[in-house]
Amino acid sequence: MRFEQLHLSPALLRAVAEEGYTTATPIQVQAIPHVLEGRDLVGCAQTGTGKTAAFALPILQRLAGQPMHKPRPIRVLVLAPTRELATQIHESFQSYGRHVDVRSTVMFGGVGQEPQVRNLQRGPDVLVATPGRLLDLMGQGHVHLAYLQTLVLDEADRMLDMGFVRDVQRIVKALPKVRQTLLWSATMAPEVAKLAAELLHDPVRVAVTPQATTVEKIRQSVHFVQGKNDKRDLLDLVLRDPSFTRTIVFTRTKHGANKVVENLHRVGVVAEAIHGNKSQGARTRALDNFKSGATRVLVATDIAARGIDVDGISHVINYDLPNIPESYVHRIGRTARAGAEGIALSFCDPEERAFLSDIEKLIRLRIPVAARLLPDRPAGQVAVQAEEARRPAPRQPQHRQNRRPGQSAAQPGPRQPRQGPRPGQDSPKRHAPRPGAFV
């Protein structure tokens, strides 16, 4: 469906065309009419499906059609879990709203508050914020939300993962009870559904894919390795392929991200890290260099990566598998954006087998095993092939708590005498054989 058929104003259609878009995505087709009508909405959409425009465009149209008040009150609040995502949303409002008289601003922690306070004093119509900085400035009396009309919670699942649920509840208490609320999430875990039930009134539900499925145009594969040294060597090997033109590498920890960058520098690969310990200026520079092509490889943690909205990402590499299965969906969604195709590779060592099993249960897909690339290691090859052979078929997803590598999901029972291999070693009893793994 073309944007002209969604009853958007000529000013918005002009801005959309200038951004290079003519045809609306499925989530935009479903959501825009309901948001224009003022309905509460729950949207389940993966990254790269156009969900930001699905709420920004109708919100801009509703604001532009209202009479102007002086001083301007904040009429729309968008909450995002990370600085990068908040910045991306703010930039979208600026791009789509360039031909209408609607002001927006963004604020987040990690930087000085004075410029953000000055922007608030200019009277923005739309405020995009992370929960922590918003509560801080609300407590100082700089933010007034008495005239708020619309609340947007973006990446609600990540908001909960990061422990922001109480912050969100405190913010909501300060808002008018009569308002429009939009909740967006790439996955619809039970905790997200509970939050939606608390905050929304008779919401419309829209979705473009079944919850927790992965984007169909992403070619996924898993590479079995024996340990960290194999991961380092394998990453060096695959990045020699010139088709890896713009690659994101995900690690589980900040220290791990820094270590990967150091290793890549040693072999002549231009790479930068982006994570919570980096200053906002360093994160912005790393992201800008990645967008411009000055940096070929961006190494990121899950939290920092939520705001990475870059076209043309050719590959996503899970250097460490995530211990939260839903994070896998978000990670690989960085590629195959805006209808393009993409490739996602995952490195899996023996301590991450349980994480892989959880991911496959969630996405209801057995991830194909890639061909062997590293030189054979006879003793280790047998062990890794045996481990791959015991992978279970995907089952229906079940909620489980975060676990450390190698930690069992089962509750501890009566202590039994140890039999067989020690924890972290291969167990010969779990699953039927399957060939094809590689080191």
Image (cartoon, rainbow, N blue to C red):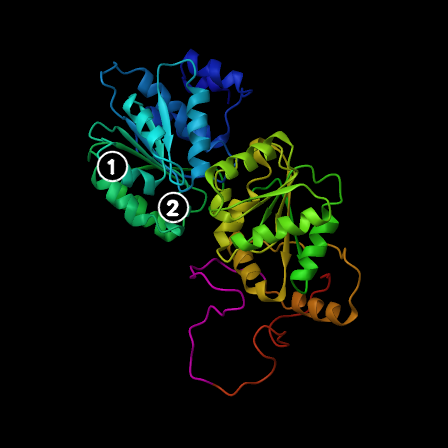
Whether residue 369 is visible: no
Q: Position of residue 60 (x, y in %)?
A: 36, 21
- Give the tally of numbered discs: 2
Please name the residue shown 67% across and 67% down the image.
Answer: 389
Figure quadrant of residue 410: bottom left
Binning the other alpha carbons within 10 Å of mark 2 as few (below 14), some (14 to 19) or many (20 upward) gives many
Prevailing secondary structure class for the magenta stretch in the rendered image: loop
Q: x, y (%) of residue 209?
A: 49, 41
Residue 31 falls inside the magenta stretch: no
Dividing the picture into quadrants, the one containing residue 108 is top left
Residue type marked 1: Met
Frontmost residue, 68 versus 337: 68
Identity of the residue drawn at 25% across and 14% down? 68
Quick check: 272 above or below 97?
Answer: below
Q: Which residue is label 2 attached to?
A: 159
The circle on residue 402 is none
Q: Residue at x 69, y 37 (%)?
A: 245
Q: Amino acid at mark 2?
A: Met
Q: Is residue 358 above or below residue 237?
A: below
Of the pair 407 and 259, the residue shown nearer to us: 259
Q: Residue furthest bottom?
A: 417
Disc 2 is placed on an element classified as helix
Who is closer to the viewer here, 71 or 77?
71
Q: CA distance from mark 2 to mark 1?
A: 19 Å
Disc 2 + disc 1, Cβ < 8 Å: no
- Considering the numbered disc 1 on the image, is that residue within a helix, a strand or a loop? helix
Say which residue appears at 30% left-offset and 21% top-offset.
Answer: 122
Residue with the mark numbered 1: 138
Viewer-nearest residue: 33 or 329: 329
Q: Which residues are magenta?
A: 393-415
Q: Position of residue 241 (x, y in %)?
A: 75, 43
Residue 43 horizontal side relative to residue 77, left or right: right
